[in-house]
Amino acid sequence: MFTTKGSVKTDKAAKYLVQLCKHFAHKVDVDLRETTGDVAFPMGLCIITAKDDCLTFTGQSHTAEGIEKMKGIIIVHLDKFAWREAPLEYHWQDDEIPD
């Protein structure tokens, strides 16, 4: 299993959590709660969490390619929603967990 943990600093984390989850819900299953959202992408699950000044992403996939695709989807969409804050600075840490 491949995993990624990502973060981006923003004062509008809660707003972007809702926007991302509502947008993704048009195509995939999403469970949105007050400060987190579980997004069931075809390549794997991603949990998005909003904190005061940070949005975090915890993703998992069976392939490294799935992780890269997931990160790409998140970046493209968040950059569109947060265009006034551009450029956002993303920090990612990828890992592989043996089966």
Image (spheres, rainbow, N blue to C red):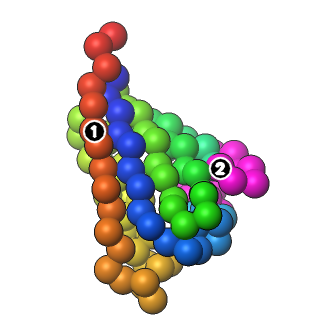
> Which residue is found at the position 74% from the left and 50% from the top?
33
Residue 22 lies left or right of residue 59; in this view the side is right
Q: Determine if the magenta segment contains residue 10.
A: no
Against 89, is 21 above or below? above
Q: Is residue 22 above or below residue 37?
A: below
Q: Which residue is labeled 2 in the image? A: 36
Identify which residue, 89 or 17, lies in the foreground: 89
Residue 26 visible in the snapshot: no
> Please, which residue is most extreme toward the top here?
99
Local packing at callout 2 (Cα closer than 10 Å; few below 14, some 14-19, many 20+) is: many
Q: Quadrant of residue 80?
A: bottom left
Give the Cα distance between marks 1 and 2.
20 Å
Percent x, y of residue 46: 49, 43
Residue 47: percent from left, percent from top? 54, 43
Q: Quadrant of the C terminus?
A: top left
SS at circle 1: strand
Tell me if residue 22 comes above or below residue 33 in the rendering.
below
Looking at this rendering, what residue extends furthest in the right direction?
Answer: 34
Residue at figure coordinates x 51%, y 59% from the top left? 55
Give the farthest residue toward the front: 52
Q: Does dot 2 land on a helix, a strand or a loop?
A: strand
- At a point 47% along the width and 79% down the height, the residue shown is 82
Pick whichever of labels 1 and 2 is earlier in the sequence: 2
Boundaries of the magenta span: 21-36
Q: Residue at x 27, y 25 (%)?
A: 96
Disc on res. 94: 1
Q: Amino acid at mark 1?
A: Asp
Q: Is residue 34 on the magenta stretch?
A: yes
Image coordinates for residue 75, horizontal then vertical, percent: 36, 64
